[in-house]
Image (cartoon, rainbow, N blue to C red):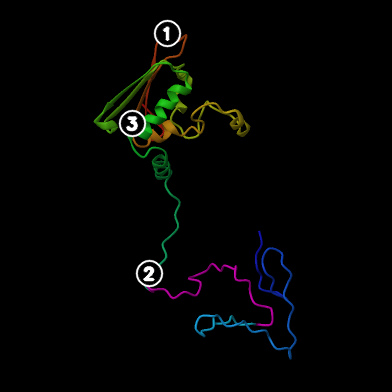
Amino acid sequence: EEYDDGDHASDADFEGSPAKKKPKDDEELPQAPPLMDGGAARPQAPVDGGAARCGANVDVGDGCGVPQEDASMEPKDILRLDPLVVNQIAAGEVVTKPPNALKELLENALDAGASTISVEVEGGGLDRLRICDDGCGIKQSDLPLLCERHATSKLQKFEDLVDIETFGFRGEALASVSYVAKVHVTTKVRGDECAYKQSFRDGAPLG
């Protein structure tokens, strides 16, 4: 990353071109030829002996010298967002409407090895979405983390992304759904004597 401190002995073009020679005091400066547009010549940029600033410099400050239209406007305080608001915004990036939620849930079922999936929809998905599948299920001990953001069974380290073979892997689908709806999960894995049920809201178990 390069920056300009304003202390130049010469002004150079971009892409490594050589610096321009500084003219002598008594040397006549070259003039740009007039444009062929009816005699109107383009205004020439001021020359300062080669020490002009590069036009790519960007100053960031209180208005950068631009007149403010509303001088009475006061700057607002910068505050940290509440974690609930952060997660609700993040949920809106993943689940914008019921079909998005359905897509995420179907992908979870396929990632679990399901061969049969049934879907029930009420109110266009706004009232209820129910997905039943015959996948491998979720262990009872994993239920507390089921709707927590970035908790996933799909990978453990960054290098696992090279061989990822699942639809999802970031651990955001169920978490995002839980921030826009109440999630009820009933699951049973092979060897369990019974199924287990858990409800979630805002990324956390209820009850």
Q: Residue furthest bottom?
A: 26
Q: Are marks 3 and 2 in contact (CB under 8 Å)?
A: no
Whole-percent x, y for residue 40 in the image: 51, 84
| Image-quadrant location for residue 78 | bottom left
* Distance of label 3 from label 2 (alpha carbons): 42 Å
User: In the displayed structure, would residue 91 be above or below residue 198?
Assistant: below
Say whether residue 56 is magenta. yes
Residue 193, numbered label: 1
What residue is at 43 percent from the left and 32 percent from the top?
A: 173
In primary-sequence order, the first of circles 3 and 2 is 2
Whole-percent x, y for residue 206 in the image: 36, 28
Element carrying mark 3 = loop
* Number of numbered discs visible in the structure rendering: 3
- Placement of the C terminus among the 4 image quadrants: top left
Given the image, on which type of amino acid does mark 3 rest?
Lys
Name the side, left or right, on which 55 lies relative to 173: right
* Distance of label 2 from label 1 (alpha carbons): 66 Å
Element carrying mark 2 = loop
Residue 73, numbered label: 2
Q: Which residues are magenta?
A: 48-71
Q: Residue furthest left?
A: 123
- Dot 3, how many residues are within 10 Å of its Cα: few (below 14), some (14-19), or many (20+)? some
